[in-house]
Image (tube, rainbow, N blue to C red):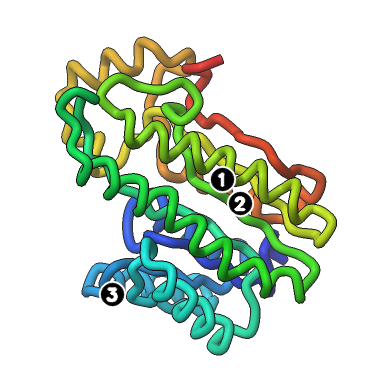
């Protein structure tokens, strides 16, 4: 018996990185996996095969998460194909870093739309389904910079802070309907993006982390599994920092 047997999990931006790790972990616990990405390319198709190898059903859907109507359409399609949506992980995200004085309106709007508006779009579309089921778990992938801020990332930090406040608000609105909402705030996680940093920069990061290492996508996936499962049935409206103790 897996922790998520029989559940259907919808994960945005799960063709690679942290989202993919969450999808694979959920699948190993028995969940059927639905994920969205801008395009379902060879990489996304390979992700479907990896998930299906866990013995569950999986499907990727092409979707612009930042588009309200597109999101409503794809969620309706997912419900038709899978019958239910028990878990929603809002993981889609981008960065367009720059100091505020040099940041363009386009940089700001792109990050807010992809990181924050997409979460609104999917929550808005999924909540009626979860209400009929009288149960659901929503997980917003935030960041420690959404808690503490970060120079050169005002747009990204604002979007991630918004995801935290969004989760807390949904938890208050929907708790009486059996729907929980929480946020995960990863710290320095070793992904394809951070792996390109120099060894010196990564070493400096690790010096600031009490556990003396960067996190892995699997570290995030483990916490997401806890929040998705009934192990956290009395946990809602919380933000869990997964950062090795960096921001205690």
Where 175 sits versus 87, above or below? above
Q: Which residue is mark 2?
A: 225
Residue 139 is marked as none
Question: Which callout, 2 or 3, points at the residue further toward the start of the chain?
Answer: 3
Above/below status of 110 relative to 187: below
Give the residue at the far bottom of this rendering: 80
SS at circle 2? helix
Category of crowding for the residue at label 2, using alpha-carbon neighbours closer than 10 angstroms: few (below 14), some (14–19), many (at least 20): many
Task: Give the mark toward the camera: 2 or 3.
Answer: 3
Q: Are marks 3 and 1 in contact (CB under 8 Å)?
A: no
Regarding residue 219, the answer to whether it shows in the image is no
Q: Residues within 10 Å of mark 1 (few under 14, many from 20)?
A: some
Residue at position x 54%, y 88% from top?
81
Q: Is residue 234 above or below residue 132?
A: above
Closer-to-camera residue (92/153): 153
Tag 1's secondary structure?
Answer: helix
Q: Which residue is mark 3?
A: 40
């Amino acid at each position: 018996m897996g922790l998520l047997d029989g559940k259907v999990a919808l994960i945005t931006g799960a063709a690679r990185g942290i989202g993919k790790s969450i999808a694979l972990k959920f699948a190993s616990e028995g969940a059927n996996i639905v994920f969205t990405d801008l395009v379902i390319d060879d990489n996304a198709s390979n992700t479907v095969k990896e998930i299906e190898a866990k013995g569950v059903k999986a499907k990727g859907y092409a979707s612009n998460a930042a588009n309200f109507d597109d999101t409503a359409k794809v969620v309706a399609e997912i419900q038709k194909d899978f019958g239910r949506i028990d878990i929603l992980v809002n993981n889609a995200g981008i960065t367009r870093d720059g100091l505020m004085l040099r940041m363009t309106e386009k940089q700001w709007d792109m990050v807010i739309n992809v990181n924050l508006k997409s979460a609104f779009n999917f929550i808005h579309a999924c909540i009626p389904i979860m209400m009929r089921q009288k149960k659901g778990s929503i997980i917003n992938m935030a960041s420690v910079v959404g808690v503490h801020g970060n120079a050169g990332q005002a747009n990204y930090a604002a979007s991630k802070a918004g995801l935290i406040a969004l989760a807390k608000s949904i938890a208050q609105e929907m708790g009486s309907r059996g729907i929980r909402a929480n946020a995960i705030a990863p710290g320095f996680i070793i992904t394809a993006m951070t792996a390109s940093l120099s060894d010196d920069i990564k070493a400096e990061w690790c010096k600031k982390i009490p556990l003396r290492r960067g996190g892995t996508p699997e570290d995030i996936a483990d916490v997401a599994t806890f929040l998705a499962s009934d192990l956290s049935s009395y946990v809602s409206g919380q933000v869990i920092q997964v950062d090795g103790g960096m921001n205690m």
